[in-house]
């Protein structure tokens, strides 16, 4: 939490130094698709899961090209895991539902044709709302689900992204690709397991 707070202070300081003019405040709504998986620990046969995401927020736009963006996103992270139970091969799917608060520093580059590229970077804090794990035998159709009590309540990550803005009928449309690298143990026990999430989003800035 201390590293998270320091990151917020640094980004806010950069914005204040970069431009003393009043920022434009814009609303933002976006939807997208995530591909999420685990890394670390003793995991071997791990595959990503794909789920829908969406959220809303605000974007502070400075004349210098710098921006700051924050909001609240609905996101499902997890992975598909393969293993054995009493010698029987099984497939397990871990699904963790989060409400995520990103705090992103952005920079707009010069417009190229109709498009304006934009880089974003910053921390995000995710708060668990539900965690389920389901199992089925390889080649079978019967699936059993249960609550996964071994998931941490919060997940801290770093977001790296490339966006494109464009004007359509007087509205600013935005879309891009975000990579979120988990920086805290997704589980409550060791060895450490971290999230890796790639998100494709499209939205409107108003």
Image (cartoon, helix red, strand yellow):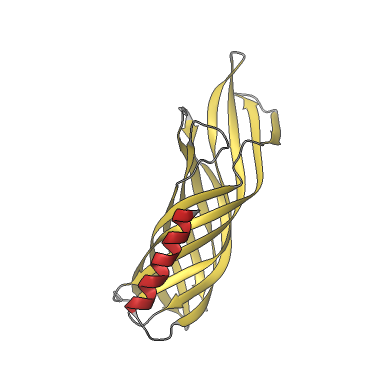
From this view, report whether residue 64 is shown above or below residue 106: below
Picture residue at 56% right of the left edge, 33% below the top: 189
The percent position of residue 147, horizontal first and vertical second, equals 70, 37
The picture quadrant where one finds residue 143 is: top right
Does residue 52 appear left or right of residue 111 in this picture?
A: right
Question: Which residue is nearer to you in this view: 180 or 9?
Answer: 9
Q: Residue furthest bottom?
A: 21
Question: Which residue is nearer to you in this view: 184 or 43?
Answer: 184
The percent position of residue 201, horizontal first and vertical second, equals 48, 61
From this view, report whether residue 140 is shown above or below residue 150: above
Question: Which residue is nearer to you in this view: 52 or 75?
Answer: 75
Picture residue at 51% right of the left edge, 40% below the top: 185
Q: Residue furthest front?
A: 2
Can residue 105 be seen here? The reply is no
The picture quadrant where one finds residue 54 is: bottom right
From this view, report whether residue 146 is shown above or below residue 204: above
The percent position of residue 11, horizontal first and vertical second, equals 40, 67
Picture residue at 62% right of the left edge, 14% below the top: 86
């Amino acid at each position: 939490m201390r590293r998270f707070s320091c990151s917020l202070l640094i980004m806010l300081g950069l914005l204040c130094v970069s431009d003393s003019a009043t920022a434009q405040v814009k609303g933002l709504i976006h939807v997208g698709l995530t591909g999420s998986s685990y890394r670390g620990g003793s995991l071997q046969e791990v595959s990503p899961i794909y789920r829908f995401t969406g959220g809303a927020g605000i974007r502070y736009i400075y004349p210098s090209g710098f921006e700051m963006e924050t909001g609240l996103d609905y996101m499902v992270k997890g992975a598909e895991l393969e293993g054995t139970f009493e010698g029987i091969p099984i497939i397990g799917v871990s699904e963790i539902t989060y409400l995520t608060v990103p705090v992103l520093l952005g920079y707009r580059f010069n417009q190229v044709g109709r498009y304006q590229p934009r880089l974003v970077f910053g921390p995000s804090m995710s708060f668990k709302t539900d965690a389920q794990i389901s199992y089925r035998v390889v080649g079978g159709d019967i699936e059993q689900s249960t609550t996964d009590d071994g998931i941490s309540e919060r997940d801290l990550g770093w977001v790296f992204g490339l966006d494109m803005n464009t004007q359509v009928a007087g509205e600013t449309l935005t879309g891009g690709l975000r990579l979120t690298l988990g920086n805290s143990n997704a589980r409550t026990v060791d060895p450490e397991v971290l999230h890796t999430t790639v998100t494709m989003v499209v939205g409107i800035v108003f």
